[in-house]
């Protein structure tokens, strides 16, 4: 791992100066605003939704709202959270295993995961307040080599293979068949047996993989668009999955190349949408904590910090070393030292934040873990051992 004192993470001053006790999350809202604006500018003609699952923090959502066309949520809880903050902003609801209440939710787009979900949507039941505009989530048999997570490209619990999609199209067909398109040119409409519909097919959704660069993302986009055109639909949500490198914190996904590539792929009349999460917010957050103890066990050096993976589960989930910078208790940058493994306060050997980092640490020193703005606090097991929650600061 790169030495923390030379880690290319922009630092203007030690975050140990934040008010209150550590551990704490510190979010740079100005940096998030600038990054979101740059992403928006690179996506001319492409709709941008933010995947709320990456980080639902209300302050971050308020910064993102002017730059996005809507929010993507994956539960009724996320939907209620977003609606309370932005009652008029478009929302897409996705995710496997939807409840009946979620299927009947008043959303802009509903991502249907299976034929059985669609059957439940069409079945007799409570009337909805508005028609259901659906995208069928597809899982295409296309290569996703190099992905950090594969949601498609083979047998996974996400979306439908072409047979499942064909079954959904049959369910949506009026008596006598259909040509793949409804009266508005978007796709067939379906009505429940009690007439509470319609359920309107608007297009497809295809979040196939995460952790890919712009070139690979564009290859997947081309395959998805070819499939959509074969179905005769013109609205395509390509999902997220833009690459984020925890080993190179200054690297950024090539949004310019991606935006230009999507513009070249898009045909007149087609609506393209993406829904990044991690790639938008990960860089704006830091988890700041303090060294409690330094000890040697069987020749290995360990630094125990306040908090741990019950506050920032990212390194445990991804199996990596979280990028960091260190500050002495006097406020100066940490110096080079014997490799030390940084662990938290939990009673488990899996509570490891970074392994064998060549930095000198002493009790009272401050450690800042960068790239903590996504899939960090919100995915962590907060109640394990019932330690205090971290503070939250916004700059």
Image (tube, rainbow, N blue to C red):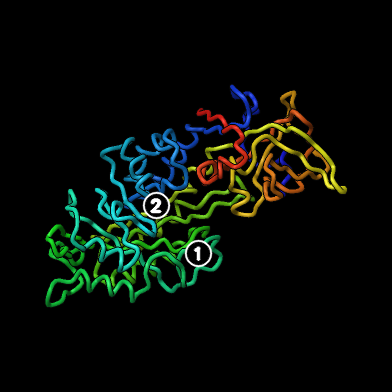
Asked where in the image residue 235 lies, by quadrant, the reply is: bottom left
Which residue is at a point 70% across and 36% down the rendered structure image?
A: 305
Which residue is at a point 31% across and 47% down the rendered structure image?
A: 91
The residue pinned by badge 1 equals 150
Residue found at the very far right of the displayed protein: 299
Asked where in the image residue 237 lies, by quadrant, the reply is: bottom left
**Pointer 1 or 2: first along the chain:** 1
Q: Give percent across and percent down for residue 136.
A: 31, 64
Dot 1 crowding, Cα within 10 Å, few <14, some 14–19, many 20+: many
Q: From the viewer's side, name the closer residue of 295 and 15.
A: 295
Which residue is at a point 50% across and 64% down the rendered structure image?
A: 150
Q: CA distance from mark 1 to mark 2?
A: 16 Å
Asked where in the image residue 112 lies, by quadrant, the reply is: bottom left
Which residue is at a point 17% across and 53% down the rendered structure image?
A: 127
The residue pinned by badge 2 equals 275
**Residue 69 located left or right of residue 386:** left
Residue 121, compared with residue 296, is above or below; it is below
**Residue 216 located left or right of residue 296:** left
Q: Give percent across and percent down for residue 315.
A: 62, 49
């Amino acid at each position: 791992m790169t030495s923390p004192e030379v880690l290319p993470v922009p630092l203007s001053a030690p975050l140990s100066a934040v008010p209150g006790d550590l551990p704490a999350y510190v979010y740079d809202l100005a940096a998030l605003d600038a990054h979101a604006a740059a992403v928006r500018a690179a996506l001319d003609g492409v709709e941008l939704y933010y995947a709320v699952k990456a980080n639902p923090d209300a302050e971050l959502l308020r910064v993102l709202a002017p730059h996005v066309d809507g929010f993507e949520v994956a539960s009724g809880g996320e939907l209620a959270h977003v609606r309370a903050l932005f009652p008029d902003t478009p929302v897409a609801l996705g995710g496997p295993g939807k409840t009946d209440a979620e299927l009947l939710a008043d959303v802009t787009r509903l991502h249907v995961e299976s034929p059985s979900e669609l059957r439940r949507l069409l079945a007799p039941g409570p009337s909805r307040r508005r028609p259901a505009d659906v995208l069928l989530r597809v899982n295409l048999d296309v290569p996703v080599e190099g992905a950090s997570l594969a949601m498609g490209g083979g047998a996974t619990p996400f979306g439908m293979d072409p047979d499942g999609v064909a079954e959904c199209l049959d369910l949506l067909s009026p008596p006598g068949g259909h040509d793949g398109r409804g009266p508005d040119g978007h796709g067939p409409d379906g009505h429940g047996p009690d007439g509470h519909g319609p359920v309107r097919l608007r297009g497809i959704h295809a979040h196939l993989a995460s952790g890919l660069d712009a070139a690979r993302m564009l290859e997947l986009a081309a395959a998805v668009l070819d499939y959509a055109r074969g179905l005769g639909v013109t609205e395509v949500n390509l999902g997220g999955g833009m690459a984020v490198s925890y080993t190179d914190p200054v690297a950024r996904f090539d949004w310019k190349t991606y935006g230009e590539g999507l513009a070249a792929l898009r045909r007149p009349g087609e609506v393209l949408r993406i829904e990044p999460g991690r790639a938008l917010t990960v860089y704006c957050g830091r988890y700041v904590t303090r060294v409690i103890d330094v000890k040697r066990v069987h020749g290995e050096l360990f630094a125990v910090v306040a908090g741990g993976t019950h506050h920032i589960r990212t390194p445990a989930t991804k199996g990596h070393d979280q990028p960091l910078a260190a500050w002495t208790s006097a406020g100066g940058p940490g110096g080079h030292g014997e490799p030390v493994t940084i662990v938290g306060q939990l009673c488990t050997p899996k509570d490891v934040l970074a392994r064998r980092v060549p930095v000198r640490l002493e009790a009272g020193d401050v450690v800042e873990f960068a790239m903590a703005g996504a899939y960090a606090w919100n995915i962590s097991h907060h109640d394990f051992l019932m330690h205090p929650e971290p503070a939250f600061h916004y700059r």
